Structure formats: structure tokens, C-alpha cells
Image (cartoon, rainbow, N blue to C red):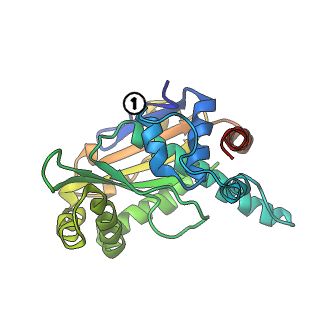
Amino acid sequence: MVALTSMVVEVDDDVVGLQWAVSDFAELAKLIAVIALGQAQHAVRIIDTLEPHGPALSDEELFRGARGQMSVRGRTDAQKEVSRYHRDGFLFECISWIVARQSSSSRTFMKDPHIAATTQGLDGLAIEMHPTEPVMVGATIFEDKCTENPRQKFKGEVLVTFGEHHTSKRARDLVANAVSLIKESGLNGTEATKAAARVVDKNFRTYRAALTVGAEISTTKRRKKLFKGYNGLADITKDQRIGATLIVDDLRNWFQELAEEVVKALNEFEAAHV
């Protein structure tokens, strides 16, 4: 059974809507546990049912670090709040990555979720290569926001970041990440760099914004309001603007429960493999 489902929902004439849902909480936690161990590429094999659950590499320090990432740290309330936001952001980034990975092909190469807390660089990037030729046929730029204020985050942060990509202000970062991913297809550095040229071409680019939302944002009207302004990314088609939502009420408690389930999976993996 897949950990997450993704259903197409209506937004408006400018945006393709996706609504995500957790179909297997324990399965999701196990996949995130493997990612937290620094083994996202092994998680790909698990998602594709090519490998059984569990880490490919086991070490006490790996488990200690992964459990630490699931913890909320800090002495003051402010420090704890920042730590929680980083932790929950990582969990949501993993959810976004797993959804994308579940629907991708063997010729899709994706940037791994951030293991270290960071606010810099790309949230996510997926490069789709031609089935048989050394040619890039598409690139998807991800922005994932775990937040109680989805409209504010979309308007004030996601659209700003996408706008910078759209006007090529982040072209160097995008090309560098694309080259790194394309090399995984077997091309050498120079060939990969040449193949990455299309990543700066709007015709080959898709944007996907993913936000946590409350149950009230489950209608076409509310989704349209949430993603208002997306059409400011001009000269692309509706299919190149994706707005994804994960409905989560009581946001921080839900992610706390997920973190605890990830720790449970880590403990089970360690008992079985170390």
C-alpha cells in the first residue's frame, strides 16, 4: 500500500490542483525514517517495492542523529518554536518528496530532502530525462510550506521565490542542481551541463507549490483564493502551475505524532539491524 495519495482537484483556469492524503501513517513514518538516516536513494527502492523496509546502512550514530532530528530542542520557548518549525518543515518536505517519487518514472531524478535544517536553496527539484536519449524533457521546482498561514506563505514567500526563478534570478543555483541530478542518469559533467540548458527554458519548467491547510480549504472557491496570483508567472500553461494541499487540522500536534511514529520506526530498525 502506498503511504500517500494524490488526487487532482479543481482550482481555476490557471492552476492544476492536487489534494494529498495520508493513506498509511505507519508506512509514511518508515519511509521518513529511512530518509532521516540519510538514505533517500534507498527509500526510492522501497517506494518502488524493489527493496524491503529498513535501512541499507546501519550505524548507531546514524540512528542517534535521525532521532535527534525528530526532537524539539532549545532552552527558551522561542528556541523550541524555531526547532519545531524546522522539524515539521523537514517532515513536510519528506511528504512532498514521497508523493512526487510515487508518481515518477525510472528516468526521474530528484533532489533529496534536506537532512540539515536550512532556509537556503531549493526546497526540491525533479528532472525528467527522455526514456532513451540523453535529453532533459522537463523540470519541476518545488516549494513546500508547513504552516498555519498558507495564504500568507504562498503570497509572501512561494510566489516571490517562483518569481525569482521565472525571471532567471536564481538560474545559477537551478543549473547547478540540475547538473548534479542529470549526472545520475549516467552523463559525464560536461554532457550533463549541456543537457541542463533546458532548465532555464520556461517551456520545460513546472512549478509546484505545496501547503498544509485546514479542512476549511477543501472547496474549489477556497483553493482559488489560496492560490490567487499564481498566474503572475506568465507565458506558461495551466499544467505548469501546480497547487498542492495537505489537509491537516491541529497542525503541530499532527506533526508531533508523525515525529513520534518516525522515532518508533527508527527504534525498530535499529533493534533489527544494529
x 62%, y 51%: residue: 58
Query: Residue 160: where, in percent of width, then height?
Result: 43, 65
Query: Residue 139: where, in percent of width, then height?
Result: 28, 55
Q: Is residue 33 left or right of residue 197?
A: right
251 versus 27 height, above or below: below
**Residue lying farthest right?**
75
Q: Is residue 122 left or right of residue 181?
A: right
Report which quarter residue 9 is drawn in: top left
x 43%, y 32%: residue: 49
Of 23 and 60, which appears nearest the observer? 60
**Residue lying farthest left?**
133
Report which quarter residue 16 is drawn in: top left
Query: Residue 198: where, in percent of width, then height?
Result: 19, 62
Of 147 and 79, which appears nearest the observer? 79
Of 49 and 248, which appears nearest the observer? 49
Is residue 212 visible from the viewing direction of this image? Answer: yes
Query: Residue 159: where, in percent of width, then height?
Result: 42, 59
How packed is label 1: few (under 14 Cα within 10 Å), some, or many (20 or more)?
Answer: some
Report which quarter residue 172 is drawn in: bottom left
Q: Which residue is mark 1?
A: 9
SS for tag 1?
strand
Is residue 225 visible from the viewing direction of this image? Answer: no
Amino acid type shown at disc 1: Val
